[in-house]
Image (cartoon, rainbow, N blue to C red):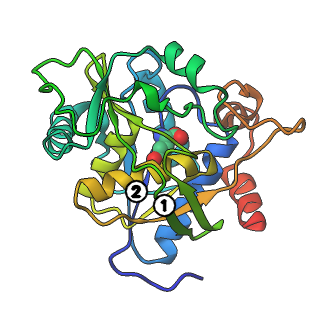
Amino acid sequence: MLEPVPSYTGRLAPSPTGRLHLGHARTFWIAAERARQSGGRLLLRMDNLDRDRCRDEYAQAALSDLAWLGLHWEAPVIVQSTRIARYRQALAQLHAAGFIFPCERSRRDVREAAGAPHEDDEEPIYPREFRPPAAAKGPPLGDVIHTNWRFRVPDGETLAFNDALVGPQSAEAGCDFGDFLVWRKDDLPSYQLASVVDDIDFGITEVVRGADLIRSTFRQLLLFHALGAPAPTFAHCALMRDESGRRLAKRHDALSLQTLRDQGVTPVDITAKFSAQS
Ligand code: GLU
């Protein structure tokens, strides 16, 4: 049992890029349980910024699957695609304070110059030789953005946090992760920036999400600091794997909640397993 924390505010943050599977269900169930046991609030945020991969039907399906599972969250749902102007304000704040620089390099340039990324993270470390000198005053942002903007990480600084589920974590900026995207050349915020701005604006006190995002948490700690806001605490849930040890992904249709629902599996069958594991 967690100590009741009256001000606890948590959030569920599905990405509507496919049907939710058992791994998502487990993470979201843990998030809901932690909010419930703390006597706190639980919000739901739809991470629908990726125009190529997100679909409304998946967003509707995610809400339906989570409600079916018995999870409750407070209305209204926070929809990231409606908050672009607010993210843009945060970007201007980072720009004015000199935290970011424009980057004309393609993903491919970065990948080729950087070598292999860490296995738990898709983003290669941004090569230092691509970075403008720290003193260089960058160009203005402009009304419409056609270039990627990156956050300049403080090389050599150690970032640390004490995860409520996986214990103490630390990473060195510039070594374990590099300069990361905050705004994309298709004029949309990156996941890192949008997530932090939402967590600040909605007063999130604890972020519960999959362990695949631990490395992103270090980037996000830098963003909370740069935006002058206290960081929440974090609880990263172990990822679920299939029989061959591969991380569950949206391609695992057999384990999608829709398939399980169609087969007559009940929410209690699923959540009873989660409680036994936690
Ligand atoms: N939308 C992300 C996901 O589905 C989670 C992001 C977050 O919790 O910060 O993996």
The percent coordinates of residue 212 (x first, y second) are 62, 45
Number of other residues with Cα within 10 Å of mark 2, as a class: few under 14, some 14 to 19, many 20 or more:
many
Lower position in the chain sequence, tag 1 or tag 2 = 1
Q: Which residue is mark 2?
A: 221
Q: Which residue is mark 1?
A: 159
> Is mark 1 in CB contact (under 8 Å) with mark 2?
yes
The percent coordinates of residue 55 (x first, y second) are 43, 21
Label 1: state its secondary structure: strand
Tell me the quarter of the picture where residue 145 sits.
top left
Reply above or below: 16 against 166.
above
Q: Is residue 70 visible?
A: no
The residue positioned farthest toward the bottom in the image shown: 3
Reply above or below: 238 against 55.
below
The three-letter amino acid code for the residue at tag 2 is Leu
Q: Identify which residue is drawn at 18% across, 35% down.
A: 88
Q: Identify which residue is drawn at 49% across, 29% down.
A: 127
**Mark 1 and mark 2: span between their CA atoms?**
8 Å
- Look at the numbered disc 1 and say if its residue's Cβ is closer than 8 Å to ligand 1: no
The three-letter amino acid code for the residue at tag 1 is Leu
Reply above or below: 47 against 109.
below
Tell me the quarter of the picture where residue 186 sits.
top left
